[in-house]
Image (cartoon, helix red, strand yellow):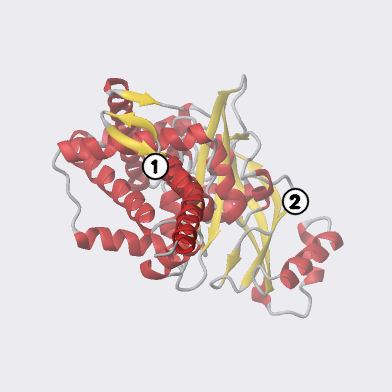
Amino acid sequence: MSGKTIMKLVQSVALLCLALTPVAAVAQNQFRQIALVNGAIITEFELEQRARFLTLLGSPTGTRADVLDELIKERLRIQATTQAGIELSDEALQTGLTEFAARAELSAEEFVERLEADGVAGETFRDFVTTSLLWRDYVRARFGSTVRIGNEDVDRAVQSIGDNTSIDVLVSEIIIPTPPDSEGEVLALAQEIMSVQSEAEFSEFARQFSATASRDNGGRLEWVPITDLPPQLRPILLALAPGDVTAPLPIPDAIALFQLRSIRERAAPAARYSSIEYATYFIAGGRSPEALARARQVEAQIDRCDDLYGIAKGQPESVLQRYTLPPAEIPRDIAIELAKLDRNEVSTALTRANGSNLMFLMLCGRTPLLADAENAEIDREAVAVQLRNARLSALADTALEELQSDADIVIFD
């Protein structure tokens, strides 16, 4: 081999080493240890993957410290479930992956392809779902038999409605439409929202998915007397602690969730009503831009419910309906919207006929309740489910706090 050939070979090797050096440095940085949780390593790569994964899901990622804190909790959950002998079958995992991907109207394989195209490894998705399912089974196995909701518990929650007519609640709402054949996907999304840990997370979901006017404010509503809300909803909210989210509540053409932000007592009891009068005027086209534009035109042309008769003149009688009903008999979704309205105010948050008709809802008036007792039918089963979920969630949070306080956690950055 000539000296010139050797020189070229040396130069080639040198250039190759120079080219590989940055790559090697990046790879080394990616797998740099950033935390140890009882000896289990969390790497820079995992943190970057989780943050990117949450961003692609449209979830609020928070700060770097927030993402790291969630990864630490995830390690603790995995360690606890492993120690308890909780296992996940391949079939259960595949079902979980499929249900999660279905929220984006994709198969699990298609969902992974989309993630990988945006730089998120399939294992990141798999690990995320695996941990969630294992922890759910762990909580049920450990605490399920200890959480018993008896008739007396439901009685107390229901009784609290009558005993707390001077209570106001501060809530946030998310109303997610359910177009035909999408109920499963929307319910899966609602169950994900139910597990949020902060007001900021709930508000971000509201901005993305809620169909109500409050979405622009992150779903946040003003203070409202508890007695203005549907009778079925009151004990559910009163069973929550601030920050908790209700279980998904099915309503016509949608699913609703509420987060309790705060609760307060006022000096005088809130007014209660024997009946509420309201009108519904239906506009074809659902939530299309044309239908919403027509709703705005109608709102600009009227001042009170009586004016709607002129708007509906010449149309089928079914287009305009006017009701005077006790609060307990008003459909839950309509009652929720009416609670936000003053007399002669309008809501266009609801639809009917599988989303094909936009409901123009107008509050005509409220008749104060003169009798001492309120005519209300409470969904006791819904109250019991909410109480059980709230207690399981509280026990799970306490268990995780104990795991975290007992753990040997080292953070390197």
- Indicate the position of residue 64 as horizontal and vertical percent values: 51, 35
Q: Amino acid at mark 1?
A: Phe
Tag 2: Cα neighbours inside 10 Å, few (<14), some, or many (≥20)? some
Residue behind mark 1: 31
Counting residues from the start of the chain, the first of labels 1 and 2 encountered is 1
- Judging depth in this view, the residue of 166 and 349 nearest the camera is 349
Rendered image quadrant of residue 71:
top left
Q: In the image, what residue occupies the spot 26% across and 37% down? A: 149
- Indicate the position of residue 256 as horizontal and vertical percent values: 50, 52
Q: Which mark is residue 345?
A: 2
Instruction: Please tell me whether mark 1 or mark 2 is closer to you in this view.
Output: 1
Q: Amino acid at mark 2?
A: Glu
Q: Are marks 1 and 2 in contact (CB under 8 Å)?
A: no
Q: Which element is circle 1 on?
A: loop
Asked whether residue 89 appears in the rendered view, the answer is yes
Tag 1: Cα neighbours inside 10 Å, few (<14), some, or many (≥20)? some
Q: Which mark is residue 111?
A: none
Rendered image quadrant of residue 82:
top left
Asked whether residue 232 appears in the rendered view, the answer is no
- Judging depth in this view, the residue of 367 and 197 nearest the camera is 197
